[in-house]
Image (tube, rainbow, N blue to C red):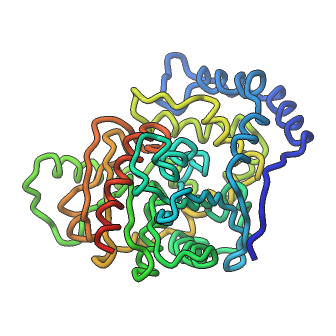
Amino acid sequence: MIEPFRIEIPQADLDDLAARLDRTRWPDELPDAGWGYGIPIQRVRELATRWRDGYDWRVHEAALNAFPQFTTVIDGAKVHFLHVRSPEPGALPLVLTHGWPGSIVEFLDVIGPLTDPARHGGDPADAFHLVVPSIPGFGFSGPTTEAGWHFERVGWAWVELMSRLGYERYGAQGGDWGTAISLAAGAAAPERVVGVHVNFLPTPPSSQPVALADPEDRERLERTRHYLANVPGYMRIQGTRPQTLAYGLADSPVGQLAWIADKFTEWVDPASTIDDDRVLTNVMLYWLTGTAGSSARIYAESQGRHRPAGDSVPLGVAVFPHDIVLPVRELARSRFHVTHWTEFDHGGHFAAMEAPDSLVADVREFFRSVRAAS
């Protein structure tokens, strides 16, 4: 059963948030520490002040409610999703998947251009019907109630979701966990998924040494090796102690803010300008739904699982230079059916927020070739 959904946060919840912000107990900070130990107090205070005194949730709640929203239960988990149909009858269905610490808020700037390209200077033939779900355990999907919600299970759930919506052939797009989930959906239903487009594709070293001719590929592989040998603290904590972390983040809005805002600085192009209110709206989807712990669990649940590889579903890759790690083209082509590859000169991990025009253009280009072939 699919039921309509509308975001209606009780005023009491907003009043509680304001009171908690007023009572923030701030930590100390070493002089001239900068970012050496994590996000600086000055930046968190700046965001917290905006959150308390200038940010208006009701404005952003209304903006989200402008899109048709629904919920359904799949494999025992509630799934919340936007379903925005294109006015073009021949539009291709496309499921967009966020990651951590993102949410459906990541895609707000690309929904219009993807569903109605004619109104945004594009070709109507590039139109998509969009399905934008909240991963189980994230946002308005709410906390999961049982173990086992790893990325492959989410991919299987998306196949079921698209089937319930009556879509027999469709594409998938994502970054961060959205990459793994989109690839998992393609592996689960290659006869239905016409193509997968990603804007994040880690390519760790293979068990068999590979001689890379391109110096840039060698540099990227070394960067990936270093990243894997020095796994960031957030990943270790969320992959091993998500419940312990949850107590602090569920109780302290500034704790939740700092945990997320840290990544919205570290993982982006320094030249990018993600609006502070957009970051705060993203944080609100974690705070208001109490999903700090359940969203972190995907790291623990997915331990030991590898992103599916395969040569049956076409893969398009958009590479943004300030992402966490960059893919090695030769390794990617040895593991996937890569039919499209674009290198950009700007943008980072949150491509839909940092470089929406570039991402939209690349998604259109990739699926244009897929449509022609299918």
**Residue shown at 35% from the left, 39% from the top:** 322
Quadrant in which residue 373 is drawn:
bottom left
Query: Quadrant location of residue 256?
Result: top right
The answer to whether one can see residue 51 in this image is: yes
Task: Residue at 58% x, 78% y: name it.
Answer: 163
Estimate the x, y position of residue 17 in percent, counting from the top left.
83, 36
Residue at point 57%, 73% (across, down): 162
Of residues 123 and 157, the one drawn nearer to the viewer in this rendering: 123
Residue 112, position as x, y percentages in the image: 54, 46
* 319 vs 94, nearest the viewer: 94
User: 98 left or right of 56?
Assistant: left
Residue 334 spot, x, y in % from top left: 20, 70
Q: Quadrant of the N terminus?
A: bottom right
- Residue 54 higher or lower than 19, as above or below: above
Task: Tell me: 126 left or right of 22.
Answer: left
The residue located at (66%, 37%) in the rendering is: 257
Q: Could one spot residue 241 in this view of the protein? A: no
